[in-house]
Amino acid sequence: MERTLVLVKPDGVRRGLTGEVIRRIEAKGYTLVRLELREATNELLAEHYAEHQGKPFYEPLVEFMLSGPVVAMVVEGERVVEGFRSLAGATDPTKAAPGTIRGDLGRDWGLAVQQNIVHGSDSPESGAREIGIWFP
Ligand code: IDP
Ligand code: MG
């Protein structure tokens, strides 16, 4: 069965939206297989966001992801990678469609990095890689 890594980012945890994110995942019919409140570390984020190293938003992204606890989850289901990306909505919360997590609950705060509440793996291969990083 396919699995994806979902993170409720520090903005989502701070704003008390963890339950709402989990509610939407469960209401969609996916299964939670791991769930943990975690503090990220520089090393872990360097691996997790390896593809973004060197981009202008990389340092602000790491700083943001270290700004408070995150809730890390492994979520399972047929085509769950694609399905959770669809629930999450577009990266830019201003453009994310209403009805999505980022579209309903996120906004632009005028910062160097978009605070968009959730992370979801972008392919089954990324899912397996990221689950290995967060839940070794
Ligand atoms: P994703 O989370 O929708 O997969 P990615 O391109 O993987 O988006 O980027 C990782 C994270 O980096 C985003 O969720 C967002 O927080 C931030 N980010 C990505 N692109 C930009 C940008 O152009 N400006 C500011 N922040 C960005
Ligand atoms: Mg991504």
Image (spheres, rainbow, N blue to C red):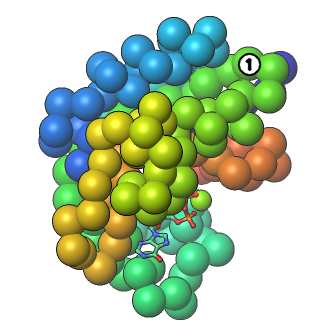
The residue depicted at 40 percent of the width and 44 percent of the height is 103
Is 9 left, or right, of 100 in this rendering?
Answer: left
16 vs 6, left or right, is left
Picture layout, residue 107 above or below residue 108:
above
Give coordinates of residue 46: x percent, y percent: 51, 70
Q: Decide if ligand 1 comes within 8 Å of the CB at mark 1.
A: no
Depth check: give the residue in front, 25 or 134: 25
Q: Is residue 61 above or below residue 107?
A: below
Image x and y of residue 132, in percent = 66, 44
Q: What is the crowding at mark 1: few (fewer than 14 residues within 10 Å), some, or many (at least 20)?
A: some
Identify the residue position indicated by label 1 in the image: 77
**In this orientation, does residue 70 appear?**
no
Q: Is residue 124 visible?
A: yes
Vertical side of 111 occupied by 5: above or below: above
Q: Quadrant of ligand 2?
A: bottom right
Number of numbered discs present?
Answer: 1
For this view, does 108 lie left or right of residue 49?
A: left
Q: Position of residue 69 (x, y in %)?
A: 25, 44
Q: Quadrant of the N terminus?
A: top right
State the SS at label 1.
Answer: loop
Taking 34 as reference, is 107 above or below it?
A: below
* Residue drawn at the location 80% of the way across and 42% of the way down: 124
Query: Hey, which quadrant is residue 115 in on the image?
Result: bottom left
Give the image quarter of residue 51: bottom right
Q: Which residue shows up at 53% across the image and 54% down it?
A: 90
Task: Indicate the amino acid at tag 1.
Answer: Gly
Quadrant in the picture for the C terminus: top right
Q: Residue at x 44, y 89 (%)?
A: 56
Report whether 84 appears left or right of 112.
right
